[in-house]
Image (tube, rainbow, N blue to C red):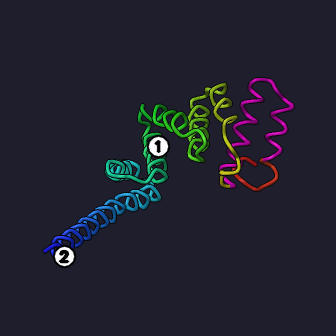
Amino acid sequence: KKYWIIAALLVQSLFVAAQVTQLQDNNIRFYNRGLELFDKEKYGAAQKQFTIFLEHCKDPLLQINTEYYIATCALELHNPDAIKLFNKIIEQYPESPKAKASAFQLGRYYFRQKETSNALEQMERVDTEYLTPEELSEYYFIIGYCQFRKENYDAARRALEQTIETKNKYY
């Protein structure tokens, strides 16, 4: 009788483990679908998929990435909560590469709003190691332009020279 109880408990625990794995597999499809939609620049639909995924996400790394994508979607959709979402990432995960990427996104946002002091402040928080070549060119252009507007011509020249080294839209 003792063996039957142990066997029943073992079978039950395997069944629960299988259900948890299936739930995680079902949940990750929301994240993957969000990425597909994000790559297609369908930010509203992507944001919904990421939000659904985040409700059940247990993986800290995926949670940070998902929060970043949600904030980026909000920024692309011109949602007023985008700044708050990026600042939350920066405050909660200061050592994460996504915090540095969030500072870059905020810098771009402030630059487009012609808030050069805020743009420069955010860009100074960026770790360029995590930027793509296109983002790096944009980073140096924004730094250079903001420094120029502040009449820091030497700093502006040094930054803008970085954009000349590669053929890009800022050249």
Estimate the x, y position of residue 81 in percent, counting from the top left: 42, 32
Q: What element carries label 2?
A: helix
Disc 1 marks which residue?
76
Q: Which residue is at the front of the view, 123 or 63?
A: 63
Residue visible at 38% across and 52% down? 58
Q: Does residue 161 lie above or below 125 as drawn? A: below
Q: Does residue 76 lie above or below 19 as drawn? A: above
Residue visible at 83% across and 44% down? 161
Estimate the x, y position of residue 169 in percent, counting from the top left: 69, 50
Estimate the x, y position of residue 115 in percent, counting from the top left: 61, 26
Residue visible at 16% across and 70% down? 5
- Quarter holding the N terminus is bottom left
Q: Give the spatial CA distance, label 1 vs label 2.
A: 60 Å
Left or right of residue 154, residue 150 in this image: left
Residue type marked 2? Tyr
Helix, strand or loop: magenta stretch: helix
Residue 87 belongs to magenta span: no
